Amino acid sequence: MGLNAFFAFVVVGAMGISWQTGMGAIFWGAVGLFLLTLFRIRYWMISNIPFSLRIGITSGIGLFIALMGLKNTGVIVANKDTLVMIGDLSSHGVLLGILGFFIITVLSSRHFHAAVLVSIVVTSCCGLFFGDVHFSGVYSIPPDISGVIGEVDLSGALSLELAGIIFSFMLINLFDSSGTLIGVTDKAGLIDSNGKFPNMNKALCVDSVSSVAGAFIGTSSVTACIESTSGVAVGGRTGLTAVVVGVMFLLVMFFSPLVAMVPPYATAGALIFVGVLMTSSLARVNWDDFTESVPAFITTVMMPFTFSITEGIALGFMSYCIMKVCTGRWRDLNLCVVVVATLFALKIILVD
């Protein structure tokens, strides 16, 4: 969503660039991402992320997901003076969202794998009595997208003025998707004893090729979703899980009225529960070593506070370098950390 917001509100909205040219910038940024993946530079970067930052990324994504869940339930709402505040806890939507969360936690503690599905069904059925669920049909034809397919302006995006935009798109996509993949693989237990990610480059190739193709069909972001951790929470571990979900998404395109019946608070409990699972990784951080714990903490809290995975990773990497250099432990830094921190610093100076 960070890339979507940057595209819609900054590139097209504030800068006044046409959406076709913006799609061209996304395309060239995705090509750069593909080249980084093809030459295994992206895999090298992910494999050399320090353990504490890796935990910070996983936990930060967990807090981010929990924040979205709390927002969808109405437990927390916006406030112009204090940014956020407690919502109306007597509201039926809030109560049903909380009910859904506890259904998941209780059933999961009893090792019932369909806990999330049961929670969604129960809370949606309860929503019927409050008029939140409205039946508007079963079948629908997907909307016509012929007006956006192939409308990408590739030549218009190849201008010096858009170089910073292309770099930003590449950097945001790189670390949004990489951070998500780290979080998902960590909670799925797919990282080996050496801290490496077997077959990660295959996943990265799929991600980068999808980003290139996405620009041609008119979408501003094709990336791994942090909600994937909900599948991991109920036992998903292999590519078959992703394939089944993909097929179901295709089918849902023709049954969108049914999906639209599910109120936001019905799925919010699952997001909060996934947040609980992912933030548990913080227990593995060495809190006695401030050069490790402080960057991990900054990474974790800045993801939800900035509402951006990329910004959390950026501040985590830069703080890691600062802590190591200022405490005389610069030898702990590897080339990957220095390069990534430098790239983020350049983005802040030259683009932001």
Image: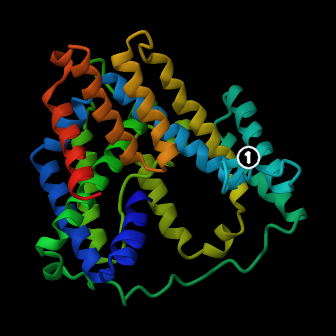
How far from the left and from the top, in percent, is residue 166?
21, 64
Q: In the picture, residue 317 is in which quadrant?
A: top left
Above or below for 4 versus 337: below
The residue most toward the bottom is 147
Q: Is residue 236 visible?
A: no
Q: Is residue 63 visible?
A: yes
> In the picture, which quadrant includes the N terminus?
bottom left
Q: Secondary structure at mark 1?
A: helix
Which residue is label 1 attached to? 119
Q: Is residue 280 left or right of residue 225?
A: right
How far from the left and from the top, in percent, is residue 177?
34, 49
Q: Nearer the viewer, residue 274 or 50?
A: 50
How far from the left and from the top, in percent, is residue 33?
19, 55
The residue most toward the left is 39
How far from the left and from the top, in percent, is residue 28?
17, 67
Q: Amino acid under label 1?
A: Ser
Label 1 environment density (alpha carbons within 10 Å; few <14, some 14–19, many ≥20): many
The residue lying at 70 percent from left, 53 percent from top is 77
The residue lying at 51 percent from left, 62 percent from top is 248
Q: Nearer the viewer, residue 133 or 342?
A: 342
Q: Is residue 132 left or right of residue 192?
A: right
> In the picture, which quadrant includes the C terminus?
bottom left
Above or below for 207 versus 261: above
Instruction: Count up the numbered dots.
Output: 1
Q: Nearer the viewer, residue 93 or 190?
A: 93
Above or below for 202 versus 146: above
Q: In the picture, residue 342 is in which quadrant?
A: top left
The residue most toward the front is 81
The residue most toward the top is 288
